[in-house]
Amino acid sequence: MQTVKLSCFMYKISKQFAFSASHVLNMLDKNHPCARMHGHNYLITVHLQSDTLDEYGFVKDYKSLSIVKKFIDETLDHRHLNDVIPGHPTSENIARFIFNRFKPELPELYAVEVSETPQTSCVYAP
């Protein structure tokens, strides 16, 4: 029996956006530091993929991702995330919130990554 190996090539791109905001994770024990109001300088990375390129050789023109920057600037930057993110404004929920907001407009979107600090990140990739 002969085995046929299929190869699948995928192009992946990403773009980062930054914003600053506060939140309180009030579901935590009152002695947990994140149960107090605090803030982060967030770094959001949107990840897109496609097995084909458009007529210009792009997965997606980076310029077309300005809709993400506009949303972040208008909705998240210098806000109290408890007032914006449904449920608890954890990195995980922020990533899902952004993914769900943009998946209809960006079908190539496959993951959103949220970093609160240089040492931590969360990836939502349904």
Image (cartoon, grey):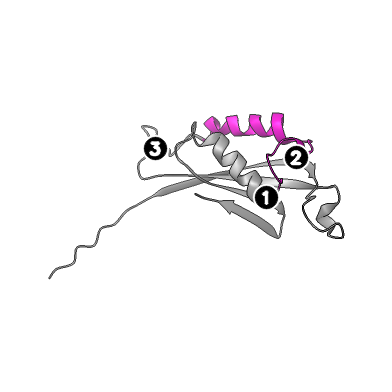
Q: Give the label, 3 or 1, closer to the camera.
A: 1
Q: Nearer the viewer, residue 103 or 18?
A: 103
Left/right placement of residue 87 relative to residue 48 reads right
Q: Nearer the viewer, residue 37 or 55?
A: 37
The amino acid sitting under disc 3 is Gly
**Cα–Cα gap, marks 3 and 1:** 33 Å
Q: Residue at x 12, y 70 (%)?
A: 1
Numbered tag placed on residue 81 in the rendering:
2
Instruction: Say which amino acid is labelled 2.
Output: Leu
> Where is mark 1, residue-wise?
91
Viewer can see residue 44: no
Marks 3/1 in contact by CB < 8 Å: the verdict is: no
Q: Is residue 65 magenta?
A: yes
> Which stretch is magenta?
62-89
Q: Nearer the viewer, residue 29 or 20?
A: 29
Q: CA distance from mark 2 to mark 1?
A: 11 Å
- Residue 34, by quadrant, is bottom right
Counting from the top left corner in percent of width and height, residue 106 is at 48, 35
Local packing at callout 1 (Cα closer than 10 Å; few below 14, some 14-19, many 20+) is many
| Sequence-earlier tag: 2 or 1 | 2
Q: Amino acid at mark 1?
A: Ser
Q: Residue at x 78, y 50 (%)?
A: 25
